[in-house]
Amino acid sequence: MSPAGSKHAPEARAREKIDALLDQAGWIVQDRDDMNLAAGLGVAVREFKLAAGHGFADYLLFVDARAIGVCEAKPAGVPLRNVEVQTKKYVEGLPPSLDAPHKPLPFAYISTGEETAFINQLDPLPRTREVFSFHRPETLQEWLTADTLEQWLKQSGGLYTAADDTRPSTLRARLRAMPPVDLPGMWPNKVQAVHDIAGT
């Protein structure tokens, strides 16, 4: 094997594992040359060329034929948080000709095939968190069709908030919009747990 081949072998092994993980989560994994977005609800396209200056996404994720996220593959042992900047470049690099419900793309994964991290750009303060598996296409589709924060607050009887209400609301956005926690009714550690989940 050539030095170049051995250099890329760990990432190639990671991609094999990622292919299997995506398949287990209900994604149809395809090569760019064989792309058929009508093949199923969720399609993950390998080595997708992005807009000029943004390179190639290891996987561009489509739900219902619309781009919704990316997955960056890295060899085992690479600290996933070190790749966040690269992933941000990919979610912002969608070619203008492609249809997407939100830009930049809302969902990003970083995976070695052994560890996977997820960033939900719809959260008020997006942050990387480890996940046990890729989300199913149906789950991401449901998140993309969630009520805006304003709609959710009106339905739940809450007051209007000045939060960004043009995007689907997430659990973290809803927790941040909750009224202050009543300390007398809860143990301090429970109050802290609510604050930690909401990122406040």
Image: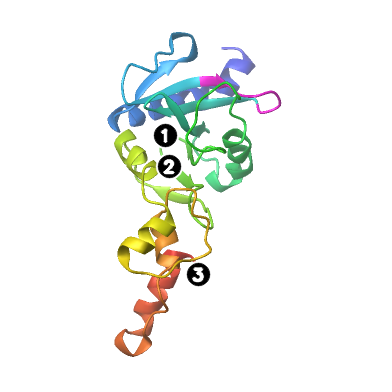
Q: Secondary structure under badge 1?
A: loop
Q: Position of residue 22 (x, y in %)?
A: 35, 30
Q: Amino acid at mark 2?
A: Glu
Residues in magenta? 47-54
* Observer-nearest of 160 and 3: 160
Marking on residue 53: none
Q: Which residue is mark 3?
A: 200
* Observer-nearest of 29 and 159: 159
Question: What is the C-alpha distance between the residues marked 1 and 2?
Answer: 6 Å
Q: Which residue is mark 2?
A: 115
- The answer to which quarter of the image holds residue 174 is bottom left
The correct choice, above or below, for 165 with respect to 57 in the image is: below
Q: Position of residue 63 (x, y in %)?
A: 38, 29
Q: Secondary structure under badge 2?
A: loop
The correct choice, above or below, for 36 with respect to 88 in the image is: above
Q: Amino acid at mark 3?
A: Thr
Q: Amino acid at mark 1?
A: Gly
Q: Which residue is mark 1?
A: 113
* Observer-nearest of 180 and 33: 180
Residue sticking out furthest to the top: 33
Question: Seen in the image, is 152 located left or right of residue 81?
Answer: left
Q: Position of residue 158 (x, y in %)?
A: 37, 69
Q: Position of residue 55 (x, y in %)?
A: 64, 25
Q: Is residue 51 magenta?
A: yes
Q: Is residue 25 magenta?
A: no
Majority secondary structure of magenta residues: loop
Residue positioned 38% across, 21% down in the render:
29
Whichever of callouts 1 and 3 sits on the residue coming sooner in the sequence is 1
The correct choice, above or below, for 6 with respect to 161 in the image is: above
- In the picture, which quadrant includes the N terminus? top right
Dot 3, how many residues are within 10 Å of its Cα: few (below 14), some (14-19), or many (20+)?
few
Q: Secondary structure under badge 3?
A: loop
